[in-house]
Image (cartoon, rainbow, N blue to C red):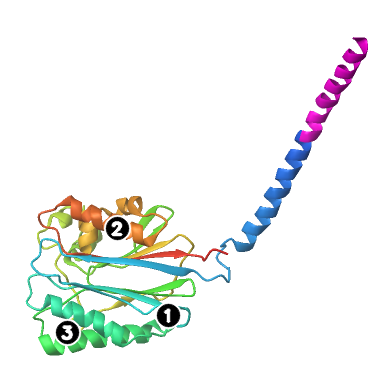
Amino acid sequence: MVELFEIDFRLGMAVFISIPVFLTALVAFFYFLDNYFNQYRKLFSDNGHTDRQLRCRIAYFSERGARKRQEDSYYISPLRNASQDGVVAVVADGIGGLKYGDDIAKLVTNGVGDNFPYVFDDPETNSTILRGISRNIYNHYHLEGGATLAMVHIRNNYMNMYSCGDSNIILVRDDKAYILNPKQNYLSVLVERHSSLGETTKSAYLDKDAKALVDFMGNSYSRVTRTFRPVRLYDGDYVIVSSDGLTDAIPLEKIPEYLHKRAVSSAERLKFTVRSSRRPSQDNYTAVIIRMEYDIV
């Protein structure tokens, strides 16, 4: 009996002593794993200077709202040579109430496609090409119609933008949404006027002509705004090129709530949300959804 007790005592002591040793070894093992994978993460982390190329994952929708005609149009450049030529995405929104809005919107996107590819590092020449498209429309239609233009050109982790009118170029980063392009509508004129006089801008948003365009494609001389320095893009960024029908139905600050890790599902959620809002005056709504991400290594 005494011998059995001594054996059990020695066994219990051995187990008791081995527990700290086992825990120490376990901690050391996880420390090794953390350091190993931390080096891996650092190797592939994006600190703004990585040579890794972001890929564009693209989805889109183009839906008719309460209007009788679909006056939106879009263009997405061929992706087969994206590494060389970049990716171009355009949305044009025909001016409602004018006879040729839908035709001109198509002329804008077709004109952009006909001139592809564009030289990424020469935005001035590219904006000249876009003004030429506008001038050709003016020469044919003589202000009987017009359309907006919102265009992005993405290449090597950077983005150039071109804009005319009030369609949107939206960047979503870290769950916050930003409109990157200036709006060329009467609201912007009113806001600037009131601000320069030190007055409140509330009345500008209530003006019945606030959404009227002050410039557009098809004008006698269109002022196509552009970036002077490209915008750096990062893993997980979303770029949304859309007609204003999207932001009329979904406030800008709410858009990140509908974006997931896949462009296709994000586009479906945005489209369904606008459709289910059932706004009586819902404009046509078109958007190209671009998610920037790295390939799985």
Amino acid marked by disc 2: Glu
**Which label's residue is closer to the chain start, 3 or 2?**
3
**Res. 268 mark:** 2
Q: Position of residue 188 (x, y in %)?
A: 22, 64
Mark 2, Cα crowd under 10 Å, few <14 / some 14-19 / many 20+, is some
SS state under label 2? helix
The nearer-to-camera label among 3 and 1 is 1
Circles 3 and 1, Cβ within 8 Å, touching? The answer is no
| Quarter holding residue 153 | bottom left
Amino acid marked by disc 1: Arg
Q: Position of residue 11 (x, y in %)?
A: 85, 22
Give whichever of 205, 75 is nearer the camera: 75
Q: What span is colored magenta in the figure?
A: 1-22
**Which label's residue is closer to the chain start, 3 or 1?**
1
Query: Looking at the rendering, in which quadrant would you find the C terminus?
Result: bottom right
**Res. 220 mark:** 3
Residue pictured at 23% horizontal, 63% vertical: 192
Give whichever of 117, 170 is nearer the camera: 117
State the residue position of label 1.
80
Query: Looking at the rendering, in which quadrant would you find the N terminus?
Result: top right
